[in-house]
Image (cartoon, helix red, strand yellow):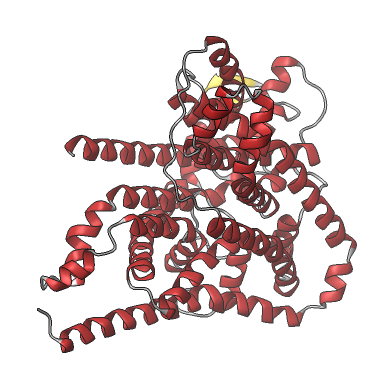
């Protein structure tokens, strides 16, 4: 049996660890935001908010968000339904193709659209298309490509856990399918769909990669923020715009939090029997193949631009664009990205796992505060976080180093991995520690020998999440990198407006995609090997 002194020491050690983590999150999350909000005092807030540029950018931002959300959510639901409710052939292939935009920076989506539909675009020349890709419609198309994979995966997960019992009862009673959809499907989807809608809307209005490339004269708030800080060094005015961008993100976060807490089900769902229906499966193939191929087109265009001398004038094969990319230190910037992404994955997994353990397995007022700080990261757009870090840490020892890029990426992408660990920890037997302590086994040993082995799948998925998102992000690091620490994704932002470097931009996008595909494949193979060994 453990004596009382030993128990108190262990309780005290866990409290100290919780306090250390609370201080850590206060420094890396709360302090930078407070610093940015205080910096607004240096600007004429009324003048910024009443300027024509700000008003137009606000209207454009809301229009882009509303139109994109209205288009992408139904499309994503259709794709998710086809995957979960049919015997669609080659499901794995379509999932990979639809998810491709998640593996490259959003600015690459805009660049891909220019390569495809620009004045000398591949499809423009091939089909003799008219019109222009620049403007509001170009932004909406690019943003749709950017957010459809996110909404699709969220809705697929929701439909995968829907219970089939009410539908079987309705079928037995002869209730028509449309009435089943209205009476069963819509009430089931109401809460999770609200979270999906707000997630898509928030992602769309806080992205600047697509509007920067294909927006043309149509400015949105993230682009205005980028121009104020990078172009004119107006940090105070940028802080005002950053504070405005926080508002919809916080609202989306609060709505998602409310739905998450109220939307849990206490029953075990019964899966759907899709049965044989060739006509349905063929019809399901049409939207999946169409959207999957459309998502693949930018990647194919990147390949063409990378290996063609000067599209469409000189179609001879060349390695000049690859050589030019390496001459402008593309290999060094790729190394920076790999270092940053690997470090973010390693430290992010450790911090997320330990934080989730303390929040779920050692409940106290401090752990509840820790949980709140952890999920607060979800409410901060990348550009706002990057600007707040630039203002808060300028002049410190970490400013201008890889360390601040690692830290800002870990904070930016922390919430989702933390929630994955949080859900995993909650699913484990709640008496493990009590039994272990009774037997004289310490908490660290229980954590190492019992809990960690049961979290292997979550560890791999969260490392992959941290790595991939750190490879593709631009918004969180654009204000913090310099010539020596620049990640390779920023080369796309640097050269997107220079036609002489279009081939280099295409090659950089392919490099990022290749690294992420290799990582995803490695995680898949490791998980399959673990499952086979079990």
* The C terminus lies in quadrant: top left
For the point 57% across and 19% down, the residue is 284
For the point 47% across and 63% down, the residue is 405
On the image, the x and y values in percent for residue 275 come to 46, 17
Residue in front for this viewpoint, 7 or 269: 269
In the drawing, does residue 298 fall left or right of residue 445? right
On the image, the x and y values in percent for residue 261 come to 53, 60
For the point 57% across and 10% down, the residue is 279
Instruction: Indicate whether 234 appears above or below 476.
Output: below
Instruction: Indicate whether 109 appears above or below 373.
Output: above
On the image, the x and y values in percent for residue 145 come to 63, 36
In the drawing, does residue 43 fall left or right of residue 427? right
Instruction: Indicate whether 151 appears above or below 410.
Output: above
In the drawing, does residue 253 fall left or right of residue 417? right
* The N terminus lies in quadrant: bottom left
On the image, the x and y values in percent for residue 188 come to 59, 42
């Amino acid at each position: 049996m453990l004596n009382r002194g030993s128990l108190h020491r262990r309780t005290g050690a866990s409290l100290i660890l919780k306090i250390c983590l609370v201080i850590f999150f206060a420094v890396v999350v709360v302090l930078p935001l407070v610093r940015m909000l205080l910096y607004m005092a240096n600007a004429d807030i009324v003048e910024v908010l009443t300027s024509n540029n700000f008003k137009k950018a606000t209207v454009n931002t809301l229009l882009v968000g509303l139109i994109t959300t209205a288009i992408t959510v139904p499309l994503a639901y259709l794709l998710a339904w086809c995957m979960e409710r049919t015997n669609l052939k080659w499901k794995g292939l379509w999932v990979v193709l639809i998810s491709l935009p998640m593996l490259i920076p959003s600015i690459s989506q805009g660049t891909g659209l220019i390569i495809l539909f620009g004045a000398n675009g591949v499809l423009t020349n091939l089909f003799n298309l008219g019109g222009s890709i620049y403007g509001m419609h170009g932004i909406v198309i690019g943003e749709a490509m950017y957010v459809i994979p996110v909404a699709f995966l969220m809705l697929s997960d929701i439909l995968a856990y829907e219970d089939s019992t009410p539908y079987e009862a309705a079928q037995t009673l002869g209730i028509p399918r449309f009435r089943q959809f209205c009476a069963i499907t819509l009430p089931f989807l109401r809460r999770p769909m609200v979270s999906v809608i707000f997630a898509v809307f928030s992602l769309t209005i806080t992205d600047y990669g697509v509007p920067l490339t294909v927006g043309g004269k149509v400015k949105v708030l993230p682009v205005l923020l980028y121009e104020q800080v990078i172009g004119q060094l107006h940090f105070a005015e940028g802080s005002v715009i950053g504070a405005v961008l926080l508002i919809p993100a916080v609202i989306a976060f609060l709505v998602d939090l409310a739905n998450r807490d109220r939307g849990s089900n206490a029953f075990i769902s019964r899966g759907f029997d899709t049965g044989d229906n060739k006509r349905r499966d063929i019809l399901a193939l049409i939207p999946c193949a169409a959207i999957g191929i459309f998502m693949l087109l930018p990647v194919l265009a990147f390949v063409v631009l990378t290996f063609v001398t000067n599209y469409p004038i000189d179609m001879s094969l060349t390695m000049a664009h690859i050589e030019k990319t390496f001459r402008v230190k593309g290999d060094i910037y790729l190394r920076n990205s790999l270092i940053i992404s690997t470090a973010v994955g390693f430290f992010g997994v450790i911090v997320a796992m330990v934080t989730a353990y303390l929040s779920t397995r050692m409940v106290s007022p401090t752990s509840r505060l820790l949980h709140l700080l952890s999920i607060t990261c979800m409410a901060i757009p990348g550009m706002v976080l990057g600007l707040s870090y630039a203002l808060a840490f300028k002049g410190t020892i970490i400013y201008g180093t890889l360390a601040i890029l690692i830290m800002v990426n870990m904070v930016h992408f922390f919430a989702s991995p933390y929630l994955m660990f949080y859900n995993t920890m909650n699913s484990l037997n709640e008496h493990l520690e009590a039994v272990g302590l009774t037997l004289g086994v310490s908490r660290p040993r229980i954590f190492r020998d019992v809990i960690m082995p049961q979290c292997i799948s979550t560890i791999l998925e969260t490392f992959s999440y941290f790595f991939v998102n750190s490879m593709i992000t631009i918004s969180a690091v654009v204000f913090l990198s310099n010539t020596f620490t620049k990640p390779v994704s920023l080369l796309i932002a640097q050269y997107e407006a220079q036609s002489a470097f279009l081939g280099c931009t295409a090659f950089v996008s392919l490099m990022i995609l290749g690294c992420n595909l290799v990582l995803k494949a490695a995680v898949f193979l490791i998980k399959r090997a673990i499952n086979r060994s079990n």
